[in-house]
Image (cartoon, rainbow, N blue to C red):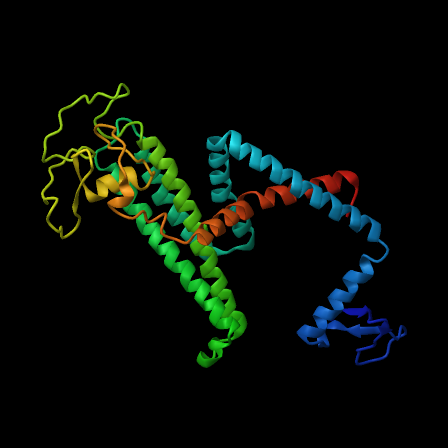
Amino acid sequence: MAGVFEVEVDGVEHDHGLEHHDEPNQFDVSKLSPEEKWRVEHARMHAKHKGHEAMHAEMVLILIVTLVVAQLVLVQWKQRHPKSYNLVTLFQMWVVPLYFTTKLHWWRFLTTWFIFSVITAYISYRATRKPLACTTPRSVYKWFLLLYKISYATGIVGYSVVMFTLFGINLIFRIKPEDAMDFGVSLLFYGLYYGVLGRDFAEMCADFMASTVGYYSASGMPTKHLSDNICAVCGQPILVDVSEEGIIENTYRLSCNHVFHEFCIRGWCIVGKKQMCPYCKEKVDLKRMFSNPWERPHVMYGQLLDWLRYLVAWQPVIIGFVQGINYVLGLE
C-alpha cells in the first residue's frame, strides 16, 4: 500500500498526489523520483526537529568536550603506558570493524578478515612459543612482508580509482561514477586497514621473539658456539656465500662479522626494528645494509595510518560514550 504524506518544502506546501483528498496537502510518496523522495525525507527531518535548537546545541557541546577530553586522555595514555595502549588499540582495530560489518552483512570484508585472522593468529602463536622454533623468524617476516606489499598495492589502486573517478575517466569505460567510487573507496579502505593491522601485529610478534631468538642469554654471553657456516637465528647451514647472489635469498654479514640468511636476519631486525646482532647483541646499523619496507612509505602515509587507527579503534568508542551521556541526560 502506497504511503501518503503531507510536507512543507521551502516554506510552501505541495500536493503531489494524483487524487485530491480531504486534506489537500497530502501526496503519494511512491510516485516520486529518488531525488524527490530525498527532499521529502529531508523536509520531514527538519519538521521533526523544529524547536529543538537549544537541545541540539547542548548535544554538539557535549560532543566537542568529549572529543577534546578523550584526545587528551589517549595522548597521555600513549606516552605513559605505550605497551598497554598499543595492545588495546590493536585489539579494537581487529574487533570493532567485525561488529559493524556483521550487522551490515559485508561478506567480502568478513571473508578477508577471517583469512587474515586465521593466518596471523597462527603466525603470532608461533612467535610467542618458548623455545622459539628456528624457522619462526623467517615465517614472521615473509608473511608480514607479503601482507605489506598486498595492502600497499591495494591502497594505491584504490586511491587511483578514486582520483580517476573525480576526473571523469571512468566515463571512458562506461562505468557509473557511483560504482567506480564505491570500488575505489573499498580498495583504499582494505589497503589502509590491513596495512595498519599488519604493522601492529608485526611489532607485537617481534617483541615476543626478541626475548627468545638467537643464541644469546640474558647475561649477554652466548650459550653455544656459532660456526662460520651456521645461521645464528635458525641454526641451519648457510649455502650461499656473502659475495654471491642467491637465487631465493642472499646471505648477509653484519658489522660484527656474524652471517645470517636474508629472511632470518630481516625477520629478526626489520620486522621488529631490532638494531642488534641476534648472536652477540652488538648494535649494528641495518639501514646501510638493506632498506626497511616499513619505512619506505612517505611520512604522510604513516600519518594516514595513524589517523585510520584512531578513527577505527577509538572513534566508535567515543561516539558511543557521547550517546550514553545524551541518553542519561534525556537528550534525543
Relative depth, front residue between 10 and 224: 224
In the rendered image, which quarter is residue 5 located in? bottom right
Above or below, 7 against 194 in this view is: below
Q: Position of residue 9 (x, y in %)?
A: 81, 71
In the rendered image, which quarter is residue 288 located in? top left
Residue 107 can be seen, yes or no: yes
The residue drawn where x is 29% and y is 48% is 291
The residue drawn where x is 21% and y is 34% is 233
Residue 110 can be seen, yes or no: no
Q: Position of residue 303 (x, y in %)?
A: 48, 49
Q: Residue furthest right?
A: 22
Relative depth, front residue between 109 and 220: 220
Above or below, 25 against 60 in this view is: below
In the rendered structure, the answer to whether residue 293 lies left or right of residue 329 reads: left
Above or below, 289 against 34 in this view is: above
Q: Position of residue 48 (x, y in %)?
A: 81, 58
In the rendered structure, the answer to whether residue 119 lies left or right of residue 240 reads: right
Q: Quadrant of the N terminus?
A: bottom right
The residue drawn where x is 82% and y is 71% is 10
Q: Position of residue 326 (x, y in %)?
A: 74, 42
In the rendered structure, the answer to whether residue 233 lies left or right of residue 297 reads: left
